[in-house]
Amino acid sequence: MVVHDTEQFIIEHYMSTNKNIPYSILELDTVPAGASHLQVFRNSLDLAQKAEAWGYTRFWLAEHHNMISIASTATAVLIGHIAGGTKRIRVGSGGIMLPNHSPLIVSEQFGTLGSLFPGRIDLGLGRAPGTDQVTAQAIRPDRMNSVYNFPQEVAQIQQYFSINNKTAQVRATVAEGVDVPLYILGSSTDSAHVASKMGLPYAFASHFAPDQLFDALQIYYTNFQPSVHQETPYAIACINVIIADTEYEAEKISTSLVRMMLGVLTNKRNYIQPPEEPTDEMRELIQNPAFQRMFKYAFIGTKETVKKKTQQFLKETGVSELMVASHTYHHEDRLKSYELFAEVMEELSYEYKS
């Protein structure tokens, strides 16, 4: 199906869905130059506490390894840290890269979290390594077997959480009967097939891999099979957002994100650098096709600018929920951006109801 037809299908889906869109945060615990990991973890908790007050639905932590700019390596540990310091917001993984782990251990970890923080823990599962191939090999040498068996290992986790597993020879006793919903994560159409077939919610990484977003959503929406876990499709899409009082201020703050993405593209990752005055050279760099692909869903500007882009994105994708990532050097800039985005979503919700 051509892209135009795909987009038309999603627009029709959007028109028939509820317009009160939940909004959530994807946290990577990015490390600014000169900051300690302890300060990063404290800032992350501070953000989660404020996000809870601002009406965010979830606070998900991503799993990455061997990257000096990202500290969310021990994902389950950080989920406990955030959940223990908040009261209502859901906390989860965006995601646990399942081929890096044993399904039994994942079930035990998240079953424990689900008991400690009942009704507040989410388990998002992906199959990408969350790192380079050499590090992936060091994490788990036989991980490719797990990649090929990803749907079966997701089902295995479901079984460990089931009360019907009590008679099994191998049990995750701390998980049995615990309410921890599963989400399938992905950046390609492969994961859309898995999520639709298993009747699970689906989260797409459009903040860094937007190319297959529409095709993946169409596959998910049209092939979704209702399950005991989810009666209707539930899609989450992630975007990058930086909001400031003026367009120039937002552009300046975003130079840290630009250099972070440049490091990803050139495989020269570094700590998050301080913002700098935007230059013609940097603006020209952003126009590079490779950069434009990664930056497609980076909404940067004033509240009004981001509001218009967000509204259009919701219309084009028909997603049930928005997940937001915001990478800045200064913690205060990030807090302000997330607070203003919460205002954007509240205003959109009010306008939809009017």
Image (tube, rainbow, N blue to C red):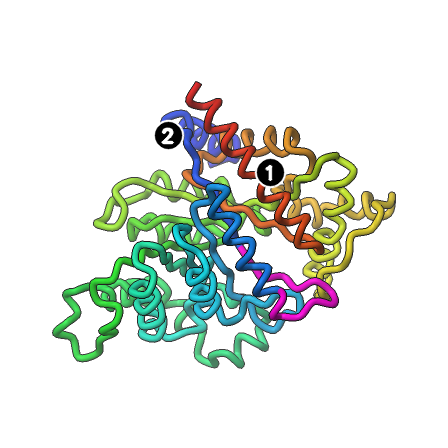
User: Where's residue 41, x and y in %?
Assistant: 57, 65
Which residue is depicted at the point 40% across and 54% down?
A: 87
User: Where's residue 22, x and y in %?
Assistant: 43, 39
- The overriding secondary structure of the stretch rendered in magenta is loop
User: Where's residue 112, x and y in %?
Assistant: 32, 69
- Horizontal side, residue 292 vs residue 281: left or right: left
Question: Which quadrant would the C terminus be assigned to in this image?
Answer: top left
Which residue is depicted at the point 83% across and 45% down?
A: 278
Residue at the limit of the structure toward the left, as seen here = 167
Stretch of the chain drawn in magenta:
27-39
Residue toward you, 21 or 286 = 21
- 31 drawn magenta: yes
Question: Crowding near pointer 2: few (<14 within 10 Å), some, many (20+)?
Answer: few
Q: Quadrant location of residue 147?
A: bottom left
Kindly identify which residue carries mark 2: 17
Residue at the limit of the structure toward the right, as seen here = 280
- Horizontal side, residue 243 vs residue 175: left or right: right
Kindly identify which residue carries mark 1: 340
